[in-house]
Amino acid sequence: MSAPAKGLAAGTWVIDPAHSSLEFSVRHLMVSKVRGRFTDFSGTLVVHDDGTADTEAEIQVASLTTDNPQRDAHLATADFFDAANYPTATFKATGFKALSSEFSVTGDFTVRGITHPVTLDVEFLGTGPGMADAPVAGFTATATVNRRDFGLTIDMPMADGGAVIGDKINLSLDIEVGLQS
């Protein structure tokens, strides 16, 4: 795969979860959005000497929070993520495509044991010296997925039409990685 951004040294870059976020939003009652985030995730970006790269990430589904304990408990059930049977969601890149200063990353996204291709629109924010004398790099990424593609098919129709929960899930990532080797 092509390198995700010029200027990244060869080696393994690891997500710094203290300086990264993985958030989502979904329509609620057809008039607003509910936002949430995952607080436990990890991942790597491996840049090879020839400039090609690989990336993968793992999300602990039970770390989901919408700041509403009752809703969070429901999202962990078989109605939604079924965290007891599918404790992790994963992403493994299958391709990078340069688009000037931005790029896209296509990969296999697995939720509830169901895998579908997803394309992330990524902006490379640059590199810096980091706090521990090791380089860091930053990225933002967005994608939209359909929850039904991943077995999140609960229907909660409203009496006057529409649904309590929309089908489109907007993902927003702010990622800082540090060079480990």
Image (cartoon, rainbow, N blue to C red):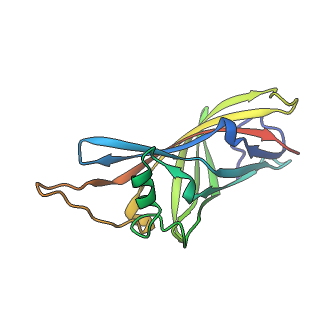
Res 17 → quadrant: top right
Residue at the image position 45 percent from the left and 46 percent from the top: 66
- How far from the left and from the top, in percent, is residue 23? 51, 43
Residue at the image position 68 percent from the left and 34 percent from the top: 138
- How far from the left and from the top, in percent, is residue 62? 55, 58
Task: Say above or below: 70 vs 129.
Answer: below
Quadrant where the C terminus sits is: top right
Residue at the image position 53 percent from the left and 66 percent from the top: 83
Task: Say above or below: 42 vs 89.
Answer: above
Q: Nearer the viewer, residue 75 or 117?
A: 75
Instruction: Give the tally of numbered discs.
Output: 0
Task: Say above or below: 73 vs 143.
Answer: below
Q: Nearer the viewer, residue 176 or 51?
A: 176
Q: Residue furthest left?
A: 160
Task: Say above or below: 19 vs 47.
Answer: above
- How far from the left and from the top, in percent, is residue 36? 46, 45
